Every structure is written in structure tokens, then in C-alpha cells.
Image: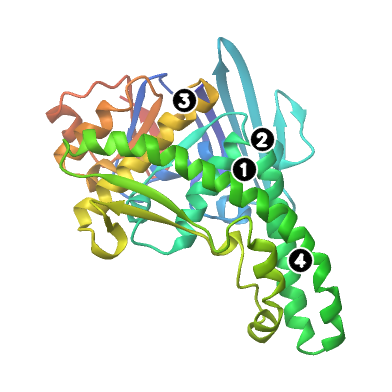
Amino acid sequence: MIIRSLELSNFRNYEKLNINFSPNVTILYGDNAQGKTNILEALYVASTTKSQKGSKDKEMIRFGESEAHIRMTVEDEGIERRIDMHLKNSKSKGVAIDGIPIRKASELYGFMNIISFSPDDLCIIKEGPSERRRFCDMELCQLDKLYLHNYTGYNRALDQRNNLLKQIAFNPELKSTLSVWDEQMINFGEYLIEKRSRFIEEISGIASKLHGILTEGRESLKIEYLPSSDKKSFRENLLSSHERDIALKMTCTGPHRDDILFVVNGEDAKKFGSQGQQRTSALTLKLAEIELVKQKTHKNPVLLLDDVLSELDRNRQTRLLENISGVQTIITCTGLEEFIKQRISYDKVYKVTSGVVSEE
């Protein structure tokens, strides 16, 4: 599946925009803070209902306006499809596929697979575990509708349980109702643990091979899943943590506390890896994500590269671009110098200046 075009109305700094994309490589270039990333954000939102930057709907609506519209046209095996999205200031977003409204925004997940790679992703290894969980969850939600169902249910039960823990401090009799949310968290959580474990095992196998290629055999990479509780012990750990959870007013065990470990040459890359090793590992992770999507869906994902080339040295730039051949790629950058130096081919080029996009 490839993205053919994007239309925006009152989205971020765009009053109106209509832009077409190449099925191969499209470049958006210009100075910082001109609106390049906003185009990628609109594509990501139209594909997943979520901003890769974690922005709320009202934050993506153009200043002074009450709503925004996104229309994305895609092509799947020669058939044109359309996604329409209506962002509102004070209401839930509206989404339609081929003109037919969907009941839940989550139904859009899996319609197409899109992968975003930005400078923030280069920090995924040295940042906190929430970023690594988010990477895992976003991809699994696109690949597996049942995972999305359990992920949503788990977070809803977790929020309710945490609210109850805070109320128990004022009304201890409510403690007996904890079991209601315990059971929901266990049912949803055991599924998440199992799927995350399998996902990390699969992506680690792919990443291990890719990392050897990227580093020309100088480094080895292994990715490990570090669950807060494994599937077998989750029930026991959650039920036995009531007193501690009540004292802390929060749920201290479960998939929301999981982490992912990156091991380079036998060492924890977060603690002992150099910045170069951490960045190469993050790059490997994204390339492995692309390959895993291909294997699972038998289709190429769409890749968004948001000013990431400027953060990579020449060798890593070359390795990245060599490994995305055949994948529709939309790239933002400040200039075209690197593409010219490396003789990298691209099909469409747009210059972005203060929310005005002009084709060159």
C-alpha cells in the first residue's frame, strides 16, 4: 500500500494543502519550523489516529480554528482508498474510510502500516522505558487488532484501579472492590505479556542479522523483553501487591511497567554503550521493524524519515537508505546536499516555507 496524496484544512500551520507523493522517495526540505514535520504528522494521524509526537487533537488544529480536516488517498494493489479524518476542539475525532464512517477510531488500525523515524527515536535506548513500550505497542496495535483490543482494555482497567487506590485512602471499605479491576487487568495483561514476548523475540532475530551487516560484523545485538511480571506470575504478583499499591496509590506491577533491553557485544547498551552504538542499535531496530511488517503483512510499510539523516553520519545514512529500497519513503530535511553528495535518487521534491509547499 502506498500514499498517493494528502489534503489538509486548518491542520497545524496549514490553512489549505494538497500534495501528491511518489511511490518511491519524496523529499520535503526547508528551514526548521516551517511545517515539514506537520505533513508527516498528518500522514501518521490519518493512518493510526494518533500523533507520533503524542499531541492531542486540539493541539493539531490551526490556531484560531475549531476543527481541522485530513484526507489521505492511498492505493492498495491498484485500488484507490480514501481516509477522511475530522479533528475537533472539544469532541472525539470523526473518521471515515471510503466515505463510510467508522464507529471507533481504533478500527483504522491495521488499514495500513506506517513507520515513523525521527531524531527522538535515536534516543529510544537511553531514554526511559515508556518510549520503548510505546514503540512495541504502536507496532503491535497496527499488526494485531486483538492486541489493540486488549491494550485498550488493560489501560482502561489500570486507570480505574489507580483511581480506586486513591479513593481507598479516604474510604478503606472500598478495598474489597479491587478484585473487579484485578481480574480485568489480569485477563488483558496476560495477553499483552505473551504477545510482547513473541514480538521482541521475532524482532530480535531480524535485528541481530541486520546489526551484523550495519556494523560489518564488529558488533552483535540482542533485544530482550524485561516484563514486570511474566505471564505465569502476573496474577500472583498483582494480588499480593494490594497493601503496597494502596500505600503508594498506584499499581506497581504489570505490562505498564515492562521494559526492553538492548545488548550490544554482551553489554547493556543503555548503561555501557557509546552514543554511536546506541544510535546504530536504534537504526537497526527501525530497519528490523520494516522487515517484520513485510513478513507479517506481505506488504511494504510506508516510512516517514523526519530530519533523521542529519543526525546520522555518512556511513549510517548510506546503510539506512540502502536498506529501504522498494519502500515508499517520505523524507524531511533542511537541504538537498547529502542526497546530491551520495547520488541518492528521489522522485519528488517540495520546498516548505512558512506553511507554503512548492514542488521543484
Residue sitting nearer the eye, 305 or 272: 272
Asked if the residue at tag 4 contacts the one at tag 3, i.e. Cβ–Cβ closer than 8 Å, the answer is: no
Q: CA distance from mark 3 to mark 2?
A: 19 Å
> Dot 1 corresponds to which residue?
49
Q: Residue at x 70, y 56 (%)?
A: 154
Q: Secondary structure at mark 2?
A: helix
Amino acid residing under circle 3? Lys
Which comes sooner in the sequence, label 4 or label 2? 2
Label 3 to label 4: alpha-carbon separation: 37 Å
The tag earlier along the polypeptide, 2 or 1, is 1
Q: Are marks 2 and 1 in contact (CB under 8 Å)?
A: yes
- Residue 322 at what x, y percent from top left? 25, 26
Find numbered disc 1 in the image and state the secondary structure of the residue it sits on. loop
The numbered mark, 3 or 2, whose residue comes first in the sequence reads 2
- The residue mark sitting in front, 4 or 2, is 4
| Residue 264 x %, y % | 26, 51
Q: In this rendering, does residue 72 appear at all?
A: yes
- Mark 1 closeness class: few <14, some 14–19, many ≥20 residues within 10 Å: many
x and y percent of residue 59 in the render? 57, 56
Numbered disc in front, either 3 or 2: 3
Sequence-wise, which precedes: disc 3 or disc 4?
Answer: 4
Q: Earlier in the sequence, mark 3 or mark 1?
A: 1
**Residue under pointer 4:** 182
Residue at the disc numbered 2:
108
